[in-house]
């Protein structure tokens, strides 16, 4: 199976491990690359460039296949050193998200590093294309993390994007099995980026309680928080997440919100398994996940189910006359 995304990243299957704050580490990224996908190490999980470079080295001991970096751009932290690190380490591709990647595009391109930008809507994808990125990830309303403020699902975003963009499109949001993969490709994507499904794998360092919560949750167990500060954030529907919504409804201060929505609180969830200490991003595809599996098994079953699906569809289509 070749798409422009597999060609761009030098991979077998068009399945990408998305940026996962604190969780996107060597073991998980290497396992995804080793299984034929593309694993991203999440730069924001590290205090500085050297820590990130050490993690890249660790991943390279686990796989000789290409790996990438997610660098999330925000207002609170300068990320320049991580881009320098990407170039120093000869990373295959950097996936940027959060803010405009323009200041970094030229230096990455000059160094032969591919750049893919993650956006929550078609107009942002067009802007990224005009800046010269190699591909875009389009995140739908269903997705874990920050799905943007437009509330549009992949079903509308991907077909529209494929009409107006030249660069390859990677779909992200609620893709957790082969049917989702096949659907994304059918709509015009050439790859998928996955978050939630990979959190519930053996190789992910998330606390066992987080993985169990994912396997038990249904598609209605996520909630959108932080709309009030223009940073919609889809998370597991816990008592704490509901409390954050209450705080937002009564216009609580940023400081109060950050007690539950900040990075320290999040680490207590994923590292310590204290599900009510903060909030964890989870996509609506969580309802499709009922087992903690190895990354290899996740990818294998995804590919074989997608193939089965397409055979069934072929039988339908072949019987239709236009
Ligand atoms: C626990 C978790 C942490 C995430 N952290 C980041 C991040 O640091 N940077 C980023 O660009 N995206 C982040 N995301 C979003 C993912 O990269 C991906 O786009 C999204 O999870 C896809 O939707 P899905 O979870 O429904 O598969 C995170 C998602 C999850 C579930």
Image (cartoon, grey):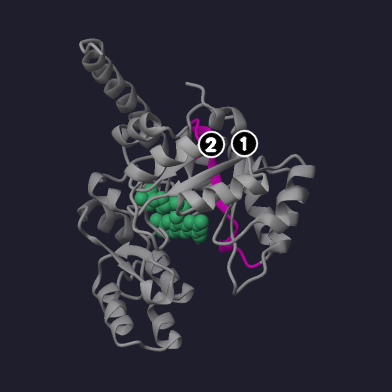
Indicate whether 292 appears above or below 320: below
Quadrant where ligand 1 appears? bottom left
Image vertical order of residue 97 relative to residue 272, above or below: above
Does the magenta segment cover residue 45? yes
User: Does dot 2 land on a helix, a strand or a loop?
Assistant: helix
Q: Residue at x 71, y 42 (%)?
A: 113
Do tag 2 and tag 1 residues touch (Cβ < 8 Å)?
Answer: yes
For residue 291, the mark is: none
Q: Which residue is mark 1?
A: 66
Q: Is residue 29 magenta?
A: no
Q: x and y percent of residue 143 in the render?
A: 36, 53
**Position of residue 251 measured from the top left corner of the image (x, y, whole percent):** 35, 87
Mark 2 or mark 1, which has the lower sequence index? 2
Camera-side residue: 251 or 157?
Answer: 157
**Distance from the alpha carbon under mark 2 to that under mark 1:** 7 Å
Q: Quadrant of residue 278?
A: bottom left
Q: Quadrant of the C terminus?
A: top left
Residue placed under numbered mark 2 in the picture = 33
Nearer-the-camera pick, 9 or 249: 249
Query: Residue shown at 66%/60% (left/top)?
Result: 51
- What stretch of residues is rendered in magenta? 32-47
Q: Is mark 2 within 8 Å of ligand 1?
A: no
In x, y percent, where is residue 209?
30, 61
Residue 20 visible from this viewpoint = no
Q: Residue at x 47, y 75 (%)?
A: 264
Q: Is mark 1 within 8 Å of ligand 1?
A: no
Please say if 217 is above or below 306.
below
């Amino acid at each position: 199976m070749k798409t422009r995304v597999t060609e761009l990243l030098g991979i077998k299957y068009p399945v990408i491990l998305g940026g996962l704050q604190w969780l996107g580490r060597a073991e998980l990224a290497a396992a995804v690359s080793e299984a034929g996908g593309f694993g991203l190490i999440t730069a924001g999980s590290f205090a500085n460039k050297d820590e990130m470079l050490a993690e890249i080295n660790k991943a390279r001991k686990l796989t000789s296949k290409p790996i990438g970096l997610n660098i999330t751009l925000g207002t609170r932290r300068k990320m320049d050193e991580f881009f320098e690190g990407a170039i120093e380490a000869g990373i295959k591709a950097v996936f940027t998200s959060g803010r405009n990647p323009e200041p970094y595009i030229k230096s990455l391109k000059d160094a032969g590093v591919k750049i893919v930008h993650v956006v929550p809507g078609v107009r942002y994808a067009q802007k990224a294309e005009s800046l010269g990125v190699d591909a875009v990830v389009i995140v739908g309303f269903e997705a874990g993390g920050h799905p943007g403020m437009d509330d549009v699902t992949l079903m509308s975003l991907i077909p529209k994007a494929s009409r107006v963009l030249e660069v390859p499109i990677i779909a992200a949001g609620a893709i957790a099995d082969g049917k989702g993969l096949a659907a994304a490709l059918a709509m015009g994507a050439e790859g998928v980026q996955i978050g939630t499904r990979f959190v519930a794998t053996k190789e992910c360092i998330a606390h066992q309680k987080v993985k169990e919560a994912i396997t038990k949750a249904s598609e209605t167990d996520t909630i959108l928080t932080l709309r009030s500060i223009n940073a919609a954030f889809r998370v597991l529907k816990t008592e704490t997440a509901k409390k954050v919504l209450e705080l937002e409804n009564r216009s609580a201060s940023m400081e109060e919100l950050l007690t539950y929505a900040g990075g320290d609180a999040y680490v207590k969830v994923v590292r310590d398994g204290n599900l009510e200490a903060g909030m964890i991003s989870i996509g609506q595809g969580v309802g499709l996940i009922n087992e903690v599996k190895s990354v290899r098994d996740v990818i294998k079953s995804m590919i074989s189910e997608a193939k089965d699906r397409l055979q069934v569809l072929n039988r339908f289509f072949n019987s239709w006359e236009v």
